Image: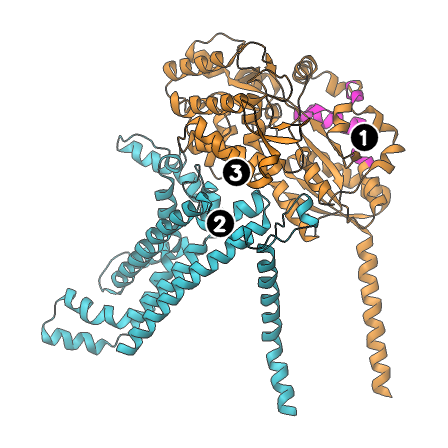
Amino acid sequence: MNRKISLWIILSLLLVGLLGISIAEAKTLSITYGEPWKELIGPVIKDFETETGVKVDVTMVPYGIDMGEKLSLDLAAGVATDIIMVDSFMIPAWAEAGYLYGLDDYLAVWPDWDQYFPGMQEIVSFEGVHYAIMISTGARMLWYSKPVFEKAGIPMPWEPKNWIDVLSTALTIKEKAPEVDAPLFIPLGTKWGEGTTMQGFYPLLLGADTHEGDRNKLRDWEAGKWIGSSPAIEKALGFYRDVFITYELSLIGPHYAPDVWGEWRRMMRESEIGIGLGGQWEWAEFWPAPPPPVDERRALVDWAPMPGSGKPDVPKITTLGGGWAIGINAAARDPNLSWKFMEILHSKVRTAEWNAAQGKVAVRKDAVEVPAYAEDEYLMEVTALMGKYSVTDRDTYPGYTIVSFLVQEATADVAVEGLSVATAMERFKEKLIEEFGADMVKTIP
Amino acid sequence: MREFRLIAVCMAPALILLLFLVAAVGWAFYASLTNIALVGRAAISPEFVGLRNYVRIFNDPAFFNSLNISFIYTTGSALIGQFLLGLFLAILLKQKGIKLKSTVAAAVVLSWVIPDIVGVYIWGAFTASGGMMNTILGIFGLPARSWLGEMPLATVIIANIWKGTAFSMILFSSALETIPLTLYEAADVDGASSWQKLKFITLPMITPTMLVDLILITMWTFGYFTLVYGLTGGGPGRLTEVFPVFIYNQSFRHYKIGYGAALSFVMTVIVGSASLLYLILLQRVERMR
């Protein structure tokens, strides 16, 4: 009898214990975010904890780690946090896998949602459902080092009209300032991950050919096929060949350094790069945090829009939007609580002030009502660029992650392995066919 | 009955471990027969594709490239580098009257105990354009080089020799301690030279240890991921894409878990065969003694 009683006592203790654990668990909210966003998310966590009394369990992914890769694994393994950051290009791939919580019910009653630019509402949606809210967006441009330009005697402000201008300026640097390691720096190969596709290949591709139809894209949206071979892809890869092989305008090593982003930023601020193709956020990130005063930065770097190839009827300037968003895990323990966090985070003033501090472009129309943002000269310049030329998005259809990886390989095929552009493009097309099937891949003659 | 219970209790941990192993390997094998991915539709509803992943492996030039790179990397850094250098150091440290003995041993062991990722950053900084290697070259008036850009495979091989030699050295050092001193004394009486003592006493006495060392470092080096991935990510291009980095890129950057699983099985077969070969050799050596 005694044994029976003690068994019951043990069992009930266990039950109470388990219940306690699950209650304690329900009272936390978990979040994963990257170190570059800590100034934004840190205060939100504090405000959320004060307002709701719920503790936030934080996973911060440090600089240099591919967060998309880490989170994809976490999500697949079912251990991802309630709130997750998502690079906008990954949204279709994650949504299709059922990883993201559809936000439409919340957005319908959230007054702020109308303040988001239509493009920024579109970029977070897949098959009609919105899955995340953007924090910031941006443009890609040509950064250049003022000390290097001065040394090479190149007049500033620099305004290249086409690819030949860009290449010939780089050749001038090579000749007049031979100590510069990379007169022209464009992200190359797989180590940059999406960085090669987004900051290197796309800015070239979008301005390579006439933009009639989807001639300068990676996907023919009307036909619903990936583009395996086209004059635009050929020209973009040709540019890589010119930079790395024909004119030897850049070292290859930095593209495979342990921390490629850190290395490129160091080289840029130390004038080891003449011209570099990169994102607008570098305005704040070329320097270790916190960035130096604006005047000091202006003395070191400036930027010019990325021109088109110069062929007749091609876009004069290419800009490319993207950016990170924040969404809710489909398996979040308490979606309402998660949404509460989202509301606190995505406030007009908070995001505008953070974007101003980071040199990032806001995704809300009402950001200009916030003085810190509206008075930022640099951001107004970038916003003007983005307003003047239509901002294009990547071809983020499910499968894009693979296409992007193959693009990264193709750039290395040309620039490192020295394959001819035609052979590299043929290889790219063959791999696409292997992945998606011959009927899903087209050739533009 | 009691005895049976005792056996069952003692066996339980092993059985549980085995269960996890079998379950994981079983799942991986199943995954290798599907198109399961980390993202997209194939993440939630993977399709059975039979042996397609395996067929694909043998039509994939990148697979043969990575196999080739792995072969050079393993031969260069483990079989030639760590093994020979470890043996040399162990014999050297056993000699009497050598100065700085403990400093050398400490330096070698230190590089071994440093965490992998720290080793990556040390070598990243060491070989960077403004790094120590180029600074040293500069002192002698030699031009700076882009080590990871111009000779990536040689650089990662040297880095791995630096990282892993200590294991072989320690293993050989302890094997050398087991050789009875009387053998050397007898050889001295017979008037044997140092070279003869090495050839006829030292090496034959530690042959089994050498084979065990070869088995272990071949397996480790073939499957060693962190150093190469951290230093070059497999690049430039595919010039340092050793097999584990290739599998990683396919599985987690390409998000193709199914294909990655199939590649892992191929790797298991390769490493397994190499180990089997060594084991057979080891058995023969033991029998000969």
Left or right relative to B54: residue B1: right
Alpha carbons under labels 2 and 1: distance apart: 50 Å
Q: Which mark is residue A347?
A: 1
Image coords of residue A90 (percent x, y) = 67, 37
Colour of chain B as rendered: cyan
Q: Residues within 10 Å of mark 1 (few under 14, many from 20)?
A: few
- Locate residue B115 relative to residue A225 in the image: left or right: left
* Callout 1: chain: A
Q: Is residue B45 above or below residue A230?
A: below
Residue at horizontal 38 percent and vertical 48 percent from the top: B68
Q: Are marks 3 and 1 in contact (CB under 8 Å)?
A: no
In which quadrant will I find the N terminus of chain B? bottom right
Which residue is disc 2 drawn over? B57
| Kind of residue sitting beneath label 2 | Ile
Residues rendered magenta in the picture: A343-368
Label 2: chain letter: B
Circles 3 and 1 on the same chain:
yes
Left or right, A275 with respect to A352, comes to: left
> Dot 3 corresponds to which residue?
A431
Identify residue type, mark 1.
Ser
Res B117 visible: no
Q: Earlier in the sequence, mark 3 or mark 1?
A: 1
- Chain for colour orange: A
Can you give x and y, in whole percent of width and height, for residue B203 in the image?
24, 68
Q: Nearer the viewer, residue B151 or B120?
A: B151
